[in-house]
Image (tube, grey):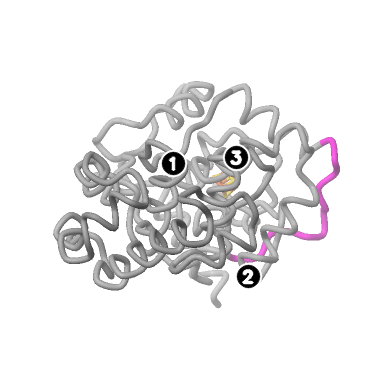
Amino acid sequence: MAKIIRAQRAKKALVRSVPKKGPKKAAKAQAKTKGKTAPSAKKSSKKSKPSKATVSKPNVSKPWTPAEVREVFERFQKANPEPRGELEHLNPFTLLVAVVLSAQATDAGVNRATRELFKVADTPQKMLDLGEERLRDYIRTIGLYLTKAKNVIALSQKLLTDFGGEVPRTRAEIESLPGAGRKTANVVLNMAYGEHTMAVDTHVFRVGNRTGLAPGKTPLEVELGLEKIIPSEFMLHAHHWLILHGRYTCLARKPRCEVCLINDLCRWPEKTV
Ligand code: SF4
């Protein structure tokens, strides 16, 4: 029954019109290869928890071969050789703060707040000098801002006390900071220090499951699955390619299979091509 309902939804999605707003850079690159226009970044960038409705089981009867996995990342690389994260930052500290602020919030919403904040507080000491109360004023448009303000002040303090004012370079040390978890550590290690980590957000979780590249019930399972199969030469950018793919092409409710670069390889039984 559930399968019939999902199939009907997928069919309905096909006849809906394409969003009017213009695409972002990465989506353009992907859509261009198929001669289509990418969707509105605004609509698709909203973060949500992975749900069963949008992450159903891939066809595991046909496992991915190493050659197919390589093919996927070669296509992503060709379409977008230097993918960039969308959280604005100036240095490892502001990246860390931006990632902590981004939990349950959109990157665009975080950027609107941090553009002004980072002009006055781009180091742990300056953040402490700003103080929790004034920090709240900068970030009050971001969800959970009271808790996040507390965490940013506490992590700034800890960076000064325990790490000489620098953002540490190990997962355990980053995870010891208030408000920072595994995903934060993975993003910071990858973007600030060039480590081959895989941060799994809602988009990567969905793509990993739908395509069958790395099925998993938890973000950690998907993370470890992806790390296991992605060739090392693609790992520096793999996280961004998968996020951008999920954000602009493999959308939660209406995946754009018709313009998807990997639609011939994807194992999702409900893909619309
Ligand atoms: S074909 Fe592409 S867009 Fe469609 S479900 Fe698979 S990965 Fe997502």
Per the rendered image, the range of residues in magenta is 56-67
Cβ of mark 3 under 8 Å from ligand 1: the answer is: no
Which labelled disc corresponds to residue 248?
A: 1
In the rendered image, residue 123 lying in the magenta stretch gets the answer no
Quadrant location, the C terminus: top right
Quadrant location, the N terminus: bottom right
Residue at image mark 3: 193
The image quadrant that residue 40 belongs to is: top left
The answer to which of 260 and 14 lies nearer the viewer is 260
Left or right: 144, with 223 as reference point = left
Amino acid residing under circle 1: Tyr
The residues bearing labels 1 and 3 have C-alpha atoms spaced at a distance of 26 Å
Around disc 2, counting alpha carbons within 10 Å, would you say few (fewer than 14), some (14 to 19), or many (20 or more)?
A: few
At 48% from the left and 24% from the top, the residue drawn is 29
Q: First in sequence: mark 1 or mark 3?
A: 3
Q: First in sequence: mark 3 or mark 2?
A: 3
The image quadrant that residue 148 belongs to is: bottom left
Residue at image mark 2: 218
